Image (cartoon, coloured by chain):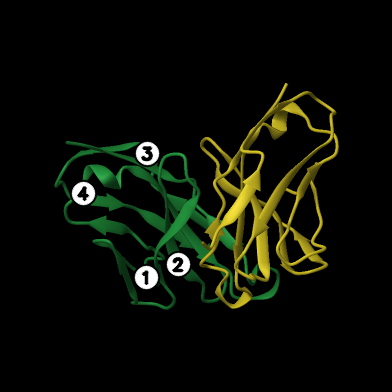
Chain colours: A yellow, B green
Amino acid sequence: EAQVTQNPRYLITVTGKKLTVTCSQNMNHEYMSWYRQDPGLGLRQIYYSMNVEVTDKGDVPEGYKVSRKEKRNFPLILESPSPNQTSLYFCASSFVGQVYEQYFGPGTRLTVT
Amino acid sequence: GNSVTQMEGPVTLSEEAFLTINCTYTATGYPSLFWYVQYPGEGLQLLLKATKADDKGSNKGFEATYRKETTSFHLEKGSVQVSDSAVYFCALSGDRGSTLGRLYFGRGTQLTVWP
């Protein structure tokens, strides 16, 4: 089954404790992206990647890191999480020529206390 | 820059009512326009798209027409069902420079349909 998976689905952590949210897709997509969804703000792009070893900042990259060492994986790293990073995070992927048709993962709800 | 503005929610309708969710955009160049839908507890799914002016996208009874003169892409459905209850996002994709390959989303509109 074609899908984007994210882990964990739910995470409660404390300020400053490094964490990684994994994202994996099995559709051989070149393009992958991370979004955060906040009430009243919709989806905002954090980082995206057009292919292996190629990453670019989205609209809200501060406090986040990403890497793209393999085509199928695109982990999101929060090296020192803060309460303002409490949010619902989505990973998405697509073919580069069809970026509009992104396949979204189920989401990761992160709470930073 | 590129941006999308859509009507504030929530929208509450009775089953079989007519639905309109307004969406307007600001963009450089010739963007493509989309509606995504997010059902409870799930990620977003592409609902329909239009890639040039006057195109009409349609899917599952929903329609939207790309109106360049009014920079709008309003979502409509003639008769909503309870199963249409979801959050709807209008989006555009950039077509040049640093915006190429990126999606810009509106804030989303919550639709609730009562039986």
Residue denoted by label 1:
B66
Q: Earlier in the sequence, mark 4 or mark 2?
A: 2
Residue type pointed to by label 3: Gly
- Give the residue at the far front of this rendering: A1
Residue denoted by label 4:
B80
Residue type pointed to by label 1: Tyr
Pinpoint the chain carrying mark 1. B
Cα separation, mark 1 vs mark 2, equals: 7 Å
Cα separation, mark 2 vs mark 3, equals: 20 Å
Residue B33 badge: 2
- The relative height of residue B4 versus residue B11 in the rendered view (above or below) is below
**Structural crowding at the residue carrying mark 4, measured as other residues with C-alpha within 10 Å and reported as few (<14), some (14–19) or many (≥20):** many
Cα separation, mark 4 vs mark 2, equals: 22 Å
Residue denoted by label 3:
B9
Mark 1 and mark 4 on one chain: yes
**Structural crowding at the residue carrying mark 3, measured as other residues with C-alpha within 10 Å and reported as few (<14), some (14–19) or many (≥20):** some
Q: Are marks 4 and 3 in contact (CB under 8 Å)?
A: no
- Give the residue at the far top of this rendering: A113
